[in-house]
Amino acid sequence: MKWLHLLTVFVFGSFVYVNLNDHDFLKWTLIYMPLALIALVHIFRRVPSNLILLYSIALIIYLVSNLGDLVQWTSSGMPSMLDLESDDVEATREFFGTMVAMLVSLLYWHWNRKRKTD
């Protein structure tokens, strides 16, 4: 199971690295780095479930506040995600990246709670 945590650290740490030259690097560091740290700490010991849940709730709030970006992308005909020129597509890629982080954090919360009861 440790390899899965290491993979999570690598993936979300890579997401932070890829955003180094982005103008909103701090925002993406705050979104992706906690999940990489949760996975890293989870290798050695259990992370408090409430901490993971708080992080997940923060991501859900962020997603709900940016739901308009997804609606705008959908209403513009759902252009290809590979279109580098469209601002709608950039916002949608960011929305889906945050959604992936939220889903993985909820999985960690679930595993952590299950591990506590075992």
Image (tube, helix red, strand yellow):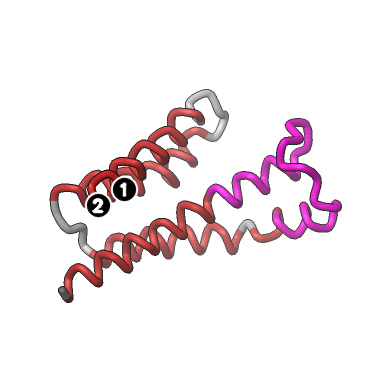
Q: Between residue 62 and residue 1, name the one nearer to us.
A: 1
Quick check: 56 above or below 40? below
Q: Amino acid at mark 2?
A: Met
Q: Amino acid at mark 1?
A: Leu
Cα separation between marks 1 and 2: 5 Å
Q: Position of residue 92 (x, y in %)?
A: 67, 48
Part of the protein shown in magenta = 70-97
| In the image: residue 48, left or right of residue 93 | left
The quarter of the picture where residue 3 lies is top left
Residue visible at 14% across and 48% down in the picture:
44
Residue furthest to the bottom in view is 117
Q: Position of residue 76 (x, y in %)?
A: 85, 52
Q: Main secondary structure of the magenta part?
A: helix
Quick check: 61 above or below 117? above
Task: Return the mark for residue 1.
Answer: 2
Query: Is disc 1 placed on a helix, strand or loop?
Result: helix
| In the image: residue 54, left or right of residue 117 | right
Residue visible at 39% across and 63% down in the picture:
106
Mark 2 Cα shell of 10 Å, populated few (<14), some (14-19), many (≥20): few
Task: Return the mark for residue 4.
Answer: 1
- Residue 26 in magenta stretch: no
Q: Position of residue 57 (x, y in %)?
A: 43, 65
| In the image: residue 96, left or right of residue 4 | right
The quarter of the picture where residue 85 lies is top right
